[in-house]
Image (cartoon, rainbow, N blue to C red):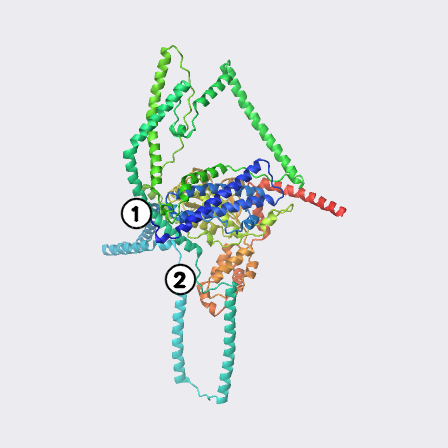
Amino acid sequence: MPLLKIPTAITTSIEAHNKWLQIIKSAQILVEEDTDLQEMALKGLRLKERNLPPEVLGRMYAQYCDLINRLYDAYLNSVHLQRAPYILEIICVFMKRMYELRNELVYLITNDYIFVDTGLTQTRLTPTDIQIVVPYHIAFECRSESIEQVLQKMWKDTVKRQFKKVTTLKSSNTGMLNGSVQECMERITDEESSESEESISSSHTFIPQDFIQANIIQKHERFRRFFMADYRAKCTKSKIYFASKFTEASESMKTSAAILIQKVYRKYMQIKRQRVIDLKRDIILGIIPDPHVQRLKFKEENNKVYERCRKIRCKIKESYIRELENEMTKLIVFRKDNQIDDITDQVLEWFKEWYYGYGFFPSYPHELEGGTLLVIRGDYRTVEEQKEEDEKLLAATKGKTKEQLQQEKLQAEADAQMKAELLKEQKQKKAELLFKQRCNPYSDPGYQAQTSSVMNELIETLQKYRSAWSIYDRYPPDKCADVLYGYIKSLITEDLMCQIHKDCRLYVDELMRLDLKLLIKMHQVMYKRMGWKYPKLSMKKKPKPPAIPRPLNIDSNLLKNMEDIFDLGIITKPKIKIDDIYGDCSYAAYELNIRDPDAKFPPPGYGDIKRRLVLSCVFGSGIEPGAKRNKSVMLLGPERNGKSFLVDAVAGELNAVKIDITPEVFSAVVNKPTRMLSQVFLAARVFQPAVIYMRNVERVFQKKIPLQDKYLNVKSLKIALPKLLKSVSVDDKIIFIATCSNPFVARAKPMVSLFNEMILVPRTDYGSLQMFFYNKLQSIKSMDRDLCVQPIAQILQGYGFGVINEVYDSVMNPERIVRLNINPFSTTEILDCLIKMGAEPTTMEEYQEYIDFYLQNSPLRKVREEFETINEYRDVAYKKIAKKKAVNQ
């Protein structure tokens, strides 16, 4: 067999492999640190002082987030087919632990937006580094290519149907047509429909701004040339026919005019050269960006590398499947019969062991439990354990009647219930005592880290990887290319032998169950001949089989029923990404949150919502097995604050279809909203991942529906929505996201109970607006590099991004961009447009109402109230301490 060589297209794979070895080592160190913290917490370690627990847990959380991002990068760079599943398994379990730490931090600082500034400083990371990236492979693997083709076909058929409706309406208005005219109309209809098919892709795309600007510049340049040629022609005619007599200037006046022009021009060029020098100096110092340099976009270039690795993996997979089939054929021919004989002998030996050691045959493990694999793994009880159990049972039941045993059972249940109540009371008393102790800073015992439920799974996952790959990781990758490229044949054989063994064991178990029944029957006959009574042996209960989800048969009838939904035009496919959200993080919230005793909770920055959207909506839709599953999420915030844009960003990041069930475009225009809503959820299941969207969900739960909103027919949605959301399977990649702008007019309890999570969208802040205007304006090359956007960002705080985007688009239209070289841009133009629009900002008092509503209907309500009470008592205690110190001094 020739020596395997690494292709030149992936020469960086050795670096990626070495980086992966460092990552797995860092993961092991992090898990060991986390385990040590858990063990010390169980021994009674408490973290005193208010700033210490957020620091320790925040550092751990930041390290897990950074490690998950690095693991994703290693998975996407890996071109070894057999190592990739292990990496995904490690990512899954690390994601579970990260969610645990996040939830613990939320309840620790009683804030749904968590901040870990000290942890970031200690680990030398930034808030951007712990923003969990949405992996590149999700867009390709979330929906199969066949389903994508069906989706595109449904959109094309929708355009055809709409075009035919329009042409039919036109022909009915023109009256009866003769045959030749009818044929002509049909031919035109077919041609236009084919054109519409060709342009269907443009209906779901957008025209780039650069293309629009280029067309406008070309139009203006053509008009300028025409105007100059026309003006010269008019001047020539004027000189010929209408030129008046003039006196030529003297030589001295011409000379003085030339000297003045030269002097002014030299000064102008001097100023221009100085400005060029100053501009280059500022660019070198990094004060302003260089507009003329095409910078590499890291994400795009990185995705190109990922795409190249993905194509290589696809090519390797073809040869891998061929090798797998050949090896499977060989093993089945030469090893399957031997495997069956070996397993049969093994089960018979197990029967003999029980018969001669215990006197009876064992109960056969059920297929759902794993069959006799339980015996191989050591999970089935041994003969000695069964004897001990029988002795205990005999000692407990000896000399007792059935009534006594029944009474003891009832008494044991009552004792267990009483014990549970006592534990509950003790836990409540302990919590009350801890609350009293926390009110005094000197008696505060500190915070005890919570016990993780996934720590054992973390350790087992890493051990599983080391047991499978520790030998191969020691091989030098430059000499043994198969450890990082392609696949290892010996592992194929081992995996296939394992699978064949499981298949053979299922077959043997079925036969040996029949043999066991015959053996038990003969054993009973033997007891009967000897005049003995065969004892009644306790049999294991058959476990309940898991519910098998009903497969979805996607056929022509199913797609035919969905045509009505597509005809409504409510199914779209947004292209916006999470990175398109402009916003800065809050850098003061951490210090204010941990202040003792005067802790404050300022609103987060608009950039902080990116992390919430990724964790709660993108991963919460079900694309990542280790993430917290959210079937429904509500975005709460003032009107026109960018909530719909955030929904589009989630859908675009998921490469999902967005189905809009807002009453204006759904229940108000269909005859049977309930039936159509069930079709919407069916379409979401067919074309998943899917985002079902509703604007202003509070109208569905209004206390009293206004007369002007009666036509929306929202009552039918109120009844059907909860039922359909419950019917969504955990495995379905479907999420329902609704926006709420006026929650005060709705019944809060039923509305909030519909959602798994409620996200309060922040009010626009100075940092986010400054970032928005700077990036938007500096992306235009003809814009002044030293344009100051800080004043406009300061003034526009509180205006929603919906209003700001509308103002920006109306001011910076293509015509205005063309005239930037002549008329420099001024930020007062945005203010003038905003004043004409008449929009009002959301004040802090108005936004506080949304915060109060959020806290009243949040799981943090009780925790926040206790925390505020503790702060009040601690404030009094600190004042007494300060007063005593002042008196003593």
Q: What kind of residue is marked 1?
A: Pro
The residue beneath circle 1 is 2
| Mark seen at residue 211 | 2
Element at badge 2?
helix
Q: Residue at x 56, y 50 (%)?
A: 121
Q: Nearer the viewer, residue 511 or 637?
A: 511
Q: Is residue 444 visible?
A: yes
Vertical arrangement, residue 71 with respect to residue 285, above or below: above
Instruction: Give me the disc on residue 844.
Output: none
Nearer-N-terminus badge (1/2): 1
The crowding category of the residue bearing disc 1, from other C-alpha atoms within 10 Å (few below 14, some 14 to 19, many at least 20), is few
Quadrant in the picture for residue 429: top right
Mark 2 closeness class: few <14, some 14–19, many ≥20 residues within 10 Å: few
> x, y (%) of residue 684?
40, 43
Q: Residue at x 65, y 37 (%)?
A: 436
Q: Is residue 642 above or below residue 109?
A: below
Image quadrant where residue 528 sits = top left
Name above or below for residue 593 compared with residue 235: above
Residue 352 pos. (x, y %)? 37, 21
Dot 1: element: loop
- Give the distance between the C-alpha atoms of the residues marked 1 and 2, in whole angstroms: 53 Å
Indicate the quadrant containing the N terminus: top left, top right, bottom left or bottom right. top left
Image location (x, y in percent) of residue 883: 73, 46
Which of 482/667 is in front?
A: 482
Whether the residues at callouts 1 and 2 have beta carbons within 8 Å, the answer is no
Percent position of residue 293, x then y: 44, 64
Left or right: residue 747 versus residue 562 is right
